[in-house]
Image: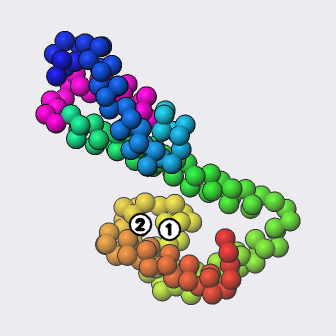
Amino acid sequence: MAYQSQDDQDALGALFQRYMHLVYGLCLKYLKSREESQDAVMSIFEQLSKKLKTQEVTYFKSWLYIVAKNHCLMVLRKKTSQKEFNGFVMENEAVLHPNDEYEIDNDLDALKDCLEGLKDKQKECVSLFYLKQKSYEEITNATSFTLNEVKSSIQNGKRNLKNCLEAKHVKR
């Protein structure tokens, strides 16, 4: 490739002109937004100038497709994790409202009841992990349980708590 051997900006411009519409179409397919797709195309071609200097590319069109697809997936992953984080913050803000104190007390009572209903091993592991914020390793050191038993007890205890709370109609 001319750009790789000579750092030729004209060659990079020719690649941009030739493949820009294909990359834009791919980005539009994944991102579903014209503005985000245009930003992604610019970002991808900025990355190309760096990546082409360091990577050996035999089939440029296929390679560019993979680079563009990976870029779009990373954008989507960032967006999804940000939405999940924002939703988590919003859920926790509801706890701060004084009007909900009665509901919170009821929810806490239900949680205590459900926690008491767990098997002893699950109750101990869940309490240490979530309430005392101990790591798996700290729990195995504090108890006679193996690492796999701790992981299994936490997973099963969490599922059983969820089922119990749903049965008590707790929505948080």
Seen from the viewer's position, the closer of residues 78 and 16 is: 16
Q: Residue at x 63, y 87 (%)?
A: 167
Give the camera-side residue of 19 and 7: 19
Q: Is residue 116 visible?
A: no
In the rendered structure, are the residues bearing label 2 and label 1 in contact, judged by CB atoms less than 8 Å apart? yes
Local secondary structure at mark 1? helix
Q: In the rendered image of this protein, does residue 95 appear above or below residue 167?
A: above
Residue 114: tell me if it is visible. yes
Q: Amino acid at mark 1?
A: Leu
Name the image colouring. rainbow
Q: Position of residue 69 (x, y in %)?
A: 34, 44
Q: Which residues are magenta?
A: 40-59
Q: Nearer the viewer, residue 133 or 64?
A: 64
**Majority SS type along the magenta span:** helix
Of callouts 2 and 1, the N-terminal one: 1
Queried whether the magenta region covers residue 43, the answer comes back as yes
Quickly name the residue at label 2: 139
Compared across the picture, whether 87 is left or right of 17 comes to right
In the image, is residue 63 part of the stretch drawn in magenta? no
Inspect the image, locate mark 2, and give the three-letter code of the amino acid beneath it: Ile
Decide if residue 163 is on the left or right side of residue 76: right
At x 62%, y 57%, the residue is 88
Residue at x-position 19% and y-position 29%: 55
Whether residue 107 sits left or right of residue 78 in the image: it is right
Task: Give me the C-alpha separation between circle 2 and circle 1.
Answer: 7 Å
Q: Quadrant of the C terminus?
A: bottom right
Q: Quadrant of residue 84?
A: bottom right
Q: Which residue is mark 1?
A: 128
> Around disc 2, counting alpha carbons within 10 Å, would you say few (fewer than 14), some (14 to 19), or many (20 or more)?
many
**Mark 2 secondary-structure assignment:** helix
The residue that appears at 48% across and 84% down in the rendered structure is: 120
Q: Which is more toward the observer, 80 or 127?
A: 80
